[in-house]
Image (cartoon, grey):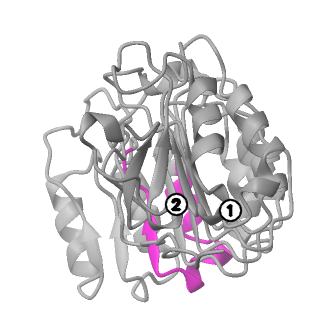
Amino acid sequence: MTPLGPTPVIDHTEQPSHHESYHEEYAGLPVAHAPWLDEDGWGPQPEAGAVAWRLTGNEFDDDAPDEIEETLDWFFDHVDTTQVTALVIGQWQECYEHSSGMVVSRLAAESARLPALRAIFLGAITPEESEISWITQADITPLLEAFPKLERLEVRGGSELSLRPVRHDTLRMLRIETGGLGAGVVRAVAASDLPALELLELWLGVDRYGGDATIGDLVPILSGERLPALRHLRLQNAEFQDEIAAAVAAAPIVARLESLSLSMGALTDVGVEALLSGQPLTHLRRLDLDHNFLSSAMMERMAKALPTVDVVLTGNDRVDGAWRFVAVSE
C-alpha cells in the first residue's frame, strides 16, 4: 500500500462563497475529476491520495456521465479509494427534484473502501447550475456515522436537509450553506456531541425557504457545553441577526472564540449596540459583520471600539427605513 497523500487542510480564515464550485482546489488539495479522461489529453491519472476527487452527474457536461451513479461506479472501479482523503460532490442528476440520498447512502455503504476519507463537500453546485434553495438534500447523519475519522463536512442546500443528534470525536469543521436552514437541523447540531469541532458555520436563511430556526434553537450552541474545542463560530445569513447579536453579547462560548461571524444577515444598529454593551470582544482576532444595515456612525463606532480586532465592515447605503434582506436566500 502506498503512503497516504497530504491531509486535507482546515483553514479557519477561509470565507467560502456559494458560487465556489471547487473545480480546481478543495481543502488545500488539487481537484481531480471523475471519470479521469486520460484519452482526452488530461494526462496520467493522479495518485489517489494526492488530490480531492470531484464526483458529478450532469447531462449538460460532456466530461461527466449523465447520472452520478455512473461516476461513483467508475470511481470505485478505477481509483485506489483506500488512499482518498477528500471528496467534492457536485451535481447529481436533476438535483432540484431528486435528493442527495442516493449519494449519501452509497458513500455510507462503501465506507470500508474509504478508510482515509477526512473531508466531504456535499453539493458543490453553483447558482448557475441550481439556486441554493432548490438543491434537494437528504439526511446527512449516515455520513457522520459511517466515517468516524471525518474531520471536515460541508453541505450546500437546505431543501429536505435533515440531521439527527450524533457524537463524533474527530469532526473539526462543520459548514452548512443554505438559503433557509430548518430548525430541526439547528437543534440536531446543538444536541450533538462534537468534542473536536473547531469551526461551526450555519447559514440560517429565510422562512420562505425553510429557515424556521429561532434564537432558542441556538442557545445550546452559544452555551458551548458540547463544543469544548470551538474557536470559530459563524451564525450568519439570518433575518433575525439582531437577536443573534444580542444573544452572543452574553453567550458563554464567546470568551474562548478567536473569530466570530454575524455576516450576510439583516444586522442593524440595534444588534451592534447589543454587542458593544455586552461582554468584551477585544480578544477576538476577527469579527465579521459584512453585509449589514448599519449606519455610518455605528460602523465608525464599532471600528474604534475594537482597534486590535480585524472588524469586517463594508460600507453600504442600506440603512434606516430600507428593506432588510439576507445575502443568500433563493
Quarter of the image for the N terminus: give it.
Answer: bottom right
User: Within the image, what quadrant is residue 137 found in?
Assistant: top right
Residue 124 in the figure: left or right of residue 99: left
Q: Which residues are magenta?
A: 243-264
Q: Is residue 39 left or right of residue 53?
A: left
Residue 223 picture location, percent across and down: 73, 70
Tell me: residue 111, above or below residue 275: above
Q: Mark 2 near mark 1, Cβ–Cβ under 8 Å? A: yes
Residue at the spot 27% in from the left edge and 88% down from the top edge: 308
Q: Which residue is mark 2?
A: 48
Identity of the amino acid at label 1? Thr
- Residue 124, how many percent across, how many down? 45, 38
Helix, strand or loop for disc 2 = helix
Q: Is residue 260 visible?
A: yes
Residue at 38%, 40% (x, y): give it: 18
Image location (x, y in percent) of residue 236 = 47, 50
What secondary structure is found at the residue carrying circle 1? helix
> Which residue does the image show at 67% across and 81% down from the upper left?
229
Residue 131, above or below 276: above
Callout 2: few (<14), some (14-19), or many (20+) C-alpha neighbours within 10 Å?
Answer: many
Query: Which image quarter: residue 181?
Result: top right
- Amino acid type, label 2: Ala
* Comes first in the chain, label 2 or label 1: 2
Residue 263 lies in magenta, yes or no?
yes
Residue 19 in view here: no
Please, is residue 227 above or below residue 138 in the view?
A: below
Residue where numbered disc 1 is placed:
82
Is residue 244 inside the magenta stretch? yes
